Image: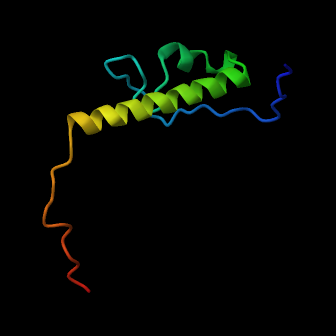
Amino acid sequence: MKEQLEFFNIPSPCIGVCSTDERGYCKGCMRKREERFNWLNFTPREQKHIIHLCRQRYRRKMMKDKINHPQEDDSNGPQESLFD
């Protein structure tokens, strides 16, 4: 199978939040240390795969946060606007 040529560089998913969580993932982009440090050495195909992994990691984290910190049930609903 031939690999499609990439005409444009795949930008780094870095958003400038450069600190890691307890699992070693960047809190901003969800990349592992080696994925961050070696980004420019990866092929475009590998970079796309890393971005896919980051999305999966982010979704898992959001689901875990949702389970561990459920929103309080507001049975009264949102406050009505004073200007309507």
Is residue 77 found left or right of 63 in the rendered image? left
Rendering quarter of residue 62: top left
Q: What residue sits 26% from the left and 86% below the top?
A: 84
Q: Nearer the viewer, residue 40 or 30?
A: 30
Residue sitting farthest toward the top: 34
Q: Where is residue 7 shown, x and y percent of the image?
A: 83, 34
Number of callouts: 0
For image coordinates 43% across by 33% down, the residue present is 58
Choose between 56 and 6: the one closer to the eye: 56
Q: Residue at x 50, y 33 (%)?
A: 55
Asked if 78 appears above or below 18 in the picture, the reply is below
Foreground of the two, 48 or 14 = 48
Q: Position of residue 81 (x, y in %)?
A: 23, 78
In which quadrant is the N terminus drawn?
A: top right
46 over 13 or under it: above or below: above
In the image, what residue occupies the spot 47% across and 35% down?
A: 16
Figure check: 76 above or below 65? below
Rendered location of residue 46, percent (x, y): 67, 20
